[in-house]
Image (spheres, rainbow, N blue to C red):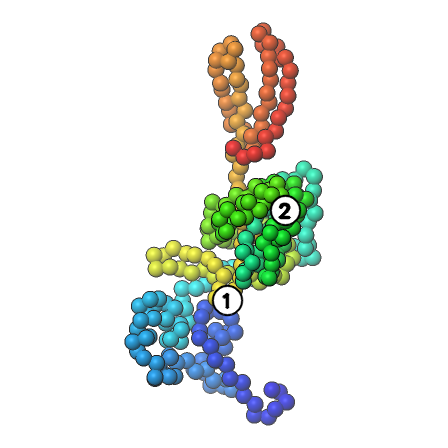
Amino acid sequence: MATVPGSMMLCASSPYARKGALWESYHRHFGRAGPTLVWQASTRTMNPTVPQSFIDAEHAKDPVSAAAEFGAEFRTDLEAYISREALDAVMENGVHERPPQPGTRYVGFVDVSGGGADSFALSIAHKEQDIGITDCVREVRPPLSPEGVIAEFADTLQSYRITKVVGDRYGGEFPREQFRKHGITYVPSAEPKGGIYLGLLPLINSGRVKLLDNQRLVTQLLGLERNTARGGKDSIDHGRGGHDDLANATAGALASSLARRPNARIGTIDFARTGRVSWRDSDQEGPRFRIIRVNEDGTPLEAKNKKETADG
């Protein structure tokens, strides 16, 4: 356009959230003198042949959406979930993947796809001190074979010594059955996606997580929106036409890595002499038992250490 004298660019769109190129142009130029003209008008102003009864019916179904679609009003119930500055602060530039390390306990989370428009995503993370660290992310975009992707992801999980993976409730029994074929137990997440996102936000803002340098992940996290419903409850999801498969898997893996495991209880069992069981709490993570068999006089017969890897 710079080479064509008097050239003009016309842009037309329904308004959406108060962010992005349309909002920035509106905010900068609407009602102000200059070379850029911003025209804001409702559907019936632009096309009076659209029946008012149709507009009224749309407002009755969803007044907030209809105000944007047919009233040309920017939505005020949508806010950005997270800032770019907050993400940059927890991203480790140049680190695209961390190989499995001996002695580290890893967790995995998958966002399941049935092979339609959504991707199939996997994220693996672990905990160091109070920091959740992302180690590996995988995303397979459609078209895809769910069975083939599960086999590939199972190999990745096993390389990190993971035998149990958490995922969303999509697909019912199908992902459980397919992961089971490869020796992986699939457990549906107890927390819905919106709740996982709500829990991730303070962790990012406080620097309690580390993200891999993955532009696709960053784009999806930046595309999440906070929507305040009529009852005042917030929900977080991707914007219109967006995707969040990799973001959901990563948020779930980080939440799982930082979840508080049941404290061990250290106790004494002495049925032979007193029939009494006594316990004291330990600040160690996970159950650990020292099982000791004794003679009648109380001297140890044998001792064996046993570490239980299952929760509970």
Q: Which residue is mark 2?
A: 154
Label 1 element class: loop
Identify which residue is drawn at 62% across, 26% down: 306
Please, what is the three-letter code of the amino acid marked with disc 2? Ala
- Residue 257 seen in the figure: no
Identify which residue is drawn at 65% across, 41% down: 161
Label 2 element class: helix
- Residue 49 seen in the figure: yes
Which quadrant of the figure has residue 50? bottom left
Q: Which residue is mark 1?
A: 241
Identify which residue is drawn at 69% across, 42% down: 101
Q: Residues within 10 Å of mark 1 (few under 14, many from 20)?
A: few
Q: Residues within 10 Å of mark 2 (few under 14, many from 20)?
A: many
Please, what is the three-letter code of the amino acid marked with disc 1? Gly
Q: Is residue 198 left or right of residue 250?
A: left
Residue 213 position within the rendered picture, expressed as x and y whole percent measured from the top left: 65, 57
Residue 157 position within the rendered picture, expressed as x and y whole percent measured from the top left: 64, 45
Q: CA distance from mark 1 to mark 2?
A: 30 Å
Q: Nearer the viewer, residue 79 or 10?
A: 10
Which numbered disc, 1 or 2, marks the residue closer to the eye? 2
**How many marks do you count on the picture?**
2
Residue 153 position within the rendered picture, expressed as x and y whole percent measured from the top left: 63, 49
Identify which residue is drawn at 33% across, 70% down: 59
Q: Nearer the viewer, residue 69 or 154?
A: 154
- Whether 36 is drawn above or below 170: the answer is below
Q: Earlier in the sequence, mark 1 or mark 2?
A: 2
Q: Is residue 145 left or right of residue 40?
A: right
- Whether 159 is drawn above or below 249: the answer is above
**Quadrant in which the N terminus appears:** bottom right
Q: Is residue 162 left or right of residue 22?
A: right
Tag shown at residue 199 = none
Which quadrant of the figure has residue 85? bottom right
